[in-house]
Image (cartoon, rainbow, N blue to C red):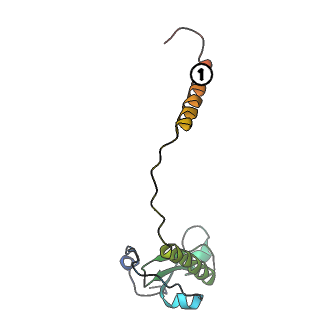
Amino acid sequence: MRGGTLCGPAEWQRPVLAMTSPIDIPLTDDALLAQCEVQTFRAGGPGGQHQNVTDSAVRLRHVPTGLTVTCRAQRSQYLNKMDALRRLRLKLQKLAAPPAPPRKATRPSRAAVERRLSAKKGRGSVKQLRRPPGGEE
């Protein structure tokens, strides 16, 4: 096994459940990293021999919530880890945000309906002028 922890792929793909209690997001990267399991692996894809021999890709799993973030954009494991921490912080903020209020169903006004229908009639008449002259087919 190359770097990282002994966790298998099934453990990394657990679904994230809606959080009932508020999430405390650590202010420092070190504190956030302490709450995570870190796994490194080979990035793969284009990039030639350097990517084929370097474990530069990083996968972070936030243990309290089960969120998983993967980053393999850079050639440096350190830069990938910093980018993964940034992405994880954004996901945690999104998860901790209050839900959006429910959408109210509205009807279009009568004037809006009339504007839409007149625009459709205008487009239809323009298209009718594009037809070749002659009898109906």
Q: Which residue is mark 1?
A: 125
Identify the residue at horizontal 56%, vertical 34% (top origin): 116
Q: Quadrant of residue 45?
A: bottom right
> x, y percentage for residue 87?
56, 75
Identify the residue at horizontal 37%, vertical 79% (top origin): 11
Front one among 50 and 33: 33
Q: Is residue 36 above or below residue 74?
A: below
Q: Which image quarter is the N terminus in?
A: bottom left
> x, y percentage for residue 18?
39, 74
Position of residue 59 in the picture relative to residue 13 (left or right): right
Front one among 20 and 128: 20
> x, y percentage for residue 135?
53, 8
Q: Secondary structure at mark 1?
A: helix
> x, y percentage for residue 61?
46, 81
Front one among 114 and 8: 114
Q: Is residue 38 above or below residue 45?
A: below
The amino acid type found where label 1 is placed reads Ser
Q: Quadrant of residue 66?
A: bottom left
How many badges with numbers are in the image? 1
Dot 1 crowding, Cα within 10 Å, few <14, some 14–19, many 20+? few
Identify the residue at horizontal 56%, vertical 36% (top origin): 111
**Furthest residue toward front:** 110
Identify the residue at horizontal 60%, vertical 15% (top origin): 132
Position of residue 54 in the picture relative to residue 21 (left or right): right
Position of residue 17 in the picture relative to residue 130 (left or right): left
